[in-house]
Image: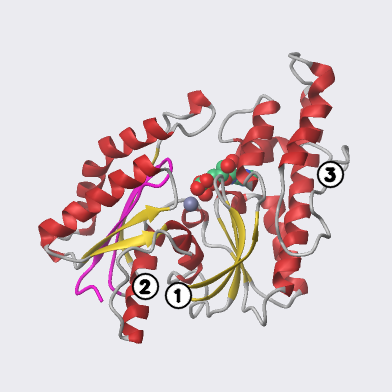
């Protein structure tokens, strides 16, 4: 187990982040830059992201250290996301972290990015008294869409996931079709507030189907079909708002149905947990809150800044993994990035 504070790095997508946690998991300092260079391209460009991580990381780490009031030599370990994610950025973050660890002669802990999302609900302060296992995690971001039974540290059961797009990807693509900006989720949600969610009867892909897989590509096609008559013409705002609201409703409906199935696939879950950028969506959150209540479960979502990619969750996962290895009396696994 780290003998001093742990420095963690996140660089798997377009967030460059660094955090320093005490051995108890308290956040001593954190810095995060959401790369803005991608908006002009309407999506994350891996090569640009990797180069931006390379340019940003050294100063970011230095700033985080300074803000924590610690010297490098006070650090007990270094951790970084090593996968899954965009490989260029991962290589930058992981090797920066490894280099630092070697220089300090402290352990380097490779963290699986999904595991970090999965354990973020157990961060101090998120759930009073600490969230016990097993819980259901709905992970919905731009790159991921899956239901995991989180049964313990290192014990994850994938109950189902998307067979095509991730939920956030669907939001982003539909927002693009509607002529909104990127990332599309927040803008689409804002526009949907002005619209009627029952104006258009979009399909509910896989709703009622056994298991808890997701599919969003049919919804995208349905939206494209609605837009066909307008060609390149700008959409009347009212119509765009109705389309956005109806699409969002369909997504919330489908996710609600899939999560209900997922809950049925677990024995006595302690909570329904949501993480990932799409978990910021108000309509979806309301649906999940009601759903959890109906199952007599708490609905837990880490605060927004911990739902999206960040280094705090990476540091926390590293501590959890160390604690579990110590409990079991086994050495730290060398690299968890290929699991679960
Ligand atoms: O977790 P995240 O920040 O990054 C990764 O993909 O790992 O998630 C970003 C995704 C984007 O697709 C964005 O459009 C979506 O989350 N998103 C939302 C909302 N805020 C962000 N989707 C729907 N409603 C929102 N309010
Ligand atoms: Zn993520």
For the magenta stretch, what is the residue range?
A: 1-23
At x 84%, y 44%, the residue is 203
Question: Which residue corresponds to mark 2?
Answer: 321
Reply yes or no: does residue 289 show up in magenta: no
Separation of marks 3 and 2 at Cα, in angstroms: 41 Å
Q: Secondary structure at mark 2?
A: helix
Question: Which residue corresponds to mark 1?
Answer: 153
At x 26%, y 35%, the residue is 55
Could you tell me which quadrant the N terminus lies in?
bottom left
Question: Which residue corresponds to mark 3?
Answer: 203
Q: Residues within 10 Å of mark 2 (few under 14, many from 20)?
A: many
Image x and y of residue 287, in percent: 74, 59
Reply yes or no: does residue 14 show up in magenta: yes
- Mark before the other along the chain sequence, 2 or 1: 1
Pick whichever, 154 or 235, lies toward us. 154
User: Image quarter for residue 53?
Assistant: top left
Tag on residue 45?
Answer: none
- Mark before the other along the chain sequence, 3 or 2: 3
Mark 1 vs 3: CB contact within 8 A:
no
């Amino acid at each position: 187990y780290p003998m001093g504070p742990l420095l963690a790095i996140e660089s798997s997508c377009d967030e460059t982040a660094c955090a320093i946690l005490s051995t108890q998991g308290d956040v001593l300092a954190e810095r995060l830059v959401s790369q803005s260079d991608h908006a002009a391209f309407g999506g994350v460009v891996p090569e640009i992201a990797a180069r931006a991580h390379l340019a940003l990381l050294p100063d970011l780490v230095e700033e985080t250290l300074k803000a924590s009031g610690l010297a490098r030599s006070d650090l007990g370990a270094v951790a970084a996301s090593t996968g899954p994610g965009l490989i260029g950025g991962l290589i930058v973050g992981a090797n920066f972290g490894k280099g630092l660890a070697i220089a300090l002669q402290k352990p380097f802990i490779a963290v699986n990015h999904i595991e970090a999302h999965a354990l973020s609900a157990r961060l101090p302060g998120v759930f009073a008294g600490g969230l016990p296992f097993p819980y259901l995690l709905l992970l919905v971001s731009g790159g991921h869409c899956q239901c995991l039974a989180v049964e313990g540290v290192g014990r994850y059961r994938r109950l189902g996931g998307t067979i095509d797009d991730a939920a956030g990807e669907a939001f982003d693509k539909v927002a693009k079709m509607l002529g909104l900006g990127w990332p599309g989720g927040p803008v689409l949600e804002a526009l949907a507030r002005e619209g009627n969610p029952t104006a258009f009867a979009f399909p509910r892909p896989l709703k009622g189907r056994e298991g808890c897989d997701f599919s969003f590509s049919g919804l995208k096609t349905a939206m494209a079909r609605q837009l066909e008559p307008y060609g390149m013409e700008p959409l009347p705002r009212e119509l765009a708002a109705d389309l956005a609201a109806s699409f969002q409703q369909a997504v919330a409906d489908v996710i609600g149905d899939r999560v209900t199935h997922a809950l049925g696939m677990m024995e006595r879950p302690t909570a329904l947990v949501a993480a990932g950028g799409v978990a910021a969506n108000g309509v979806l959150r309301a649906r999940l809150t009601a759903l959890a209540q109906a199952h007599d479960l708490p609905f837990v979502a880490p605060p927004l800044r911990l739902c999206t990619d960040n280094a705090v969750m990476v540091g926390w996962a590293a501590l959890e993994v160390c604690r579990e290895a110590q409990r079991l009396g086994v050495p730290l696994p060398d690299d968890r990035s290929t699991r679960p």
